[in-house]
Amino acid sequence: MNTLKFYPIKLRKIYELNIRNAGIESPPEKYHNTIFWISLILTVLISTVLYFFGVTAFSFIIIFFLIHAFFFFKTSLQASARIRKMEELFPDVISLMASNLRSGITIEKAFLMAARPEFDPLDKEILKTGKEITTGQDVVIALKIMSDRINSEKISKVIALIISGLKAGGNISDLLDQTSRNMKEKEVLEKKTRSTILMYVIFIFFAVGAGAPVLFGLSSVLVEIVIGLTSKLPSSALSSTASSSINIPLNFSQVSISLNFVIYFSVIFIIVTDLISCFVIGLVNKGEGKEGLKYLIPLIIISLSIFFVVRTVLSGLLKGAISFL
């Protein structure tokens, strides 16, 4: 059974591409079948445990979706990390190829000699391309196939530049050497840019992880105190205060909102805010929103812990002060 068929065509192609880019050697169908059954087993186990705590059966669908989404984004992040590593290694690879070409080695041998273990995972792609050229494949076509396999915009542009140089008949070793230097200079500039925007990432992380939970904790405690005060007032006092003709700055009335609703709303809002902030952090720091998802679970743990700690501390202090008065 091919469980990938359950996805829409566009999402299925994205998933298959992520599986290949992540360096997973098994076929996408087989890999996804394993993920599907693992997700199903985990969902059944978690739903069984939650059922004894009074959670409805509808949670089965939500849990299955969340576990499946976790594996989807995990595969996507693995693919992005692998591509980024190849992009970092590519300048050294083409610089080594340029040195090999200067020594009089043919281009197919230069490819094969550049496939060193320290260039993993790029060495496998280079070795495959070198074998294709050795077996009679045209260099231009082999490079285009390599570009499609790696699926990196940065590497694709460099390969397109190399192909144009090959077609123009220029000195390919000088072209590779100059391209390698340009890529390394660009990488240095990107690192300087990331260090500059680090302050904004820290600010977002602090505001979402500490600032928002403190404010939500304080507001939930204030609502709890107001609910407690109004519940102790007699209904006659509430109605006489509300209908009084004297101009006073406060009018007390029965609060219809429940404390559980406020707490649930705060928790859900904190989680949603953490999710959006992780996308913003990933976009600002790495240029891709999904890169920030690796901060999601730690950020949720930190923010919810601060929320409940602030709630417990402030609730004890303010309730004690009000009872003392």
Image: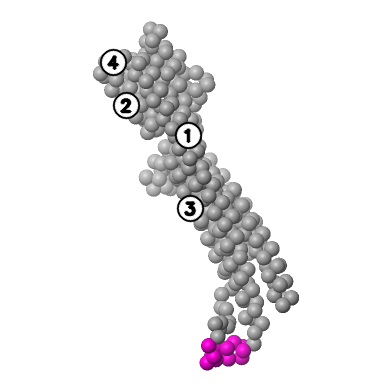
Instruction: Name the front one of labels 3 and 1.
Output: 1
Mark 4 is surrounded, within 10 Å at the Cα level, by few (under 14), some (14 to 19) or many (20 or more) other residues, namely: few
Depth check, mark 1 against mark 4: the one in front is 1
Mark 2, Cα crowd under 10 Å, few <14 / some 14-19 / many 20+, is: some
Q: Name the amino acid, label 4.
A: Gly
Whether residue 90 is situated above or below residue 79 in the rendered picture: above
Real-space Cα separation, disc 3 to disc 1, in angstroms? 24 Å
Q: Dot 4: what SS?
A: loop
Coordinates of residue 128 in the picture (x, y in percent): 42, 21
Q: Is residue 115 above or below residue 7?
A: above
Say which residue appears at 69% left-offset and 63% top-offset. 313
Q: Look at 45% across and 44% down and name the residue there.
A: 284
Task: Look at 45% across and 30% down and name the residue there.
Answer: 188
How far is the residue under mark 1 from the one under mark 4? 32 Å
Viewer-side residue, 288 vs 29: 288
Q: Of helix, strand and loop, which mostly describes the magenta segment?
A: helix
Amino acid type, label 3: Ile
Q: Within the image, what quadrant is residue 223 found in?
A: bottom right
Residue in view at x 54 percent, y 44 percent: 294
Residue identifier under label 4: 170
Q: Earlier in the sequence, mark 4 or mark 2?
A: 2
Q: CA distance from mark 3 to mark 2?
A: 36 Å
For numbered disc 3, what is the local secondary structure?
helix
Task: Give the magenta part as a residue range.
Answer: 235-247
Q: At label 2, which amino acid type do we have? A: Ala
The three-letter code of the residue at mark 1 reads: Lys
Question: Where is mark 2, residue-wise?
Answer: 160
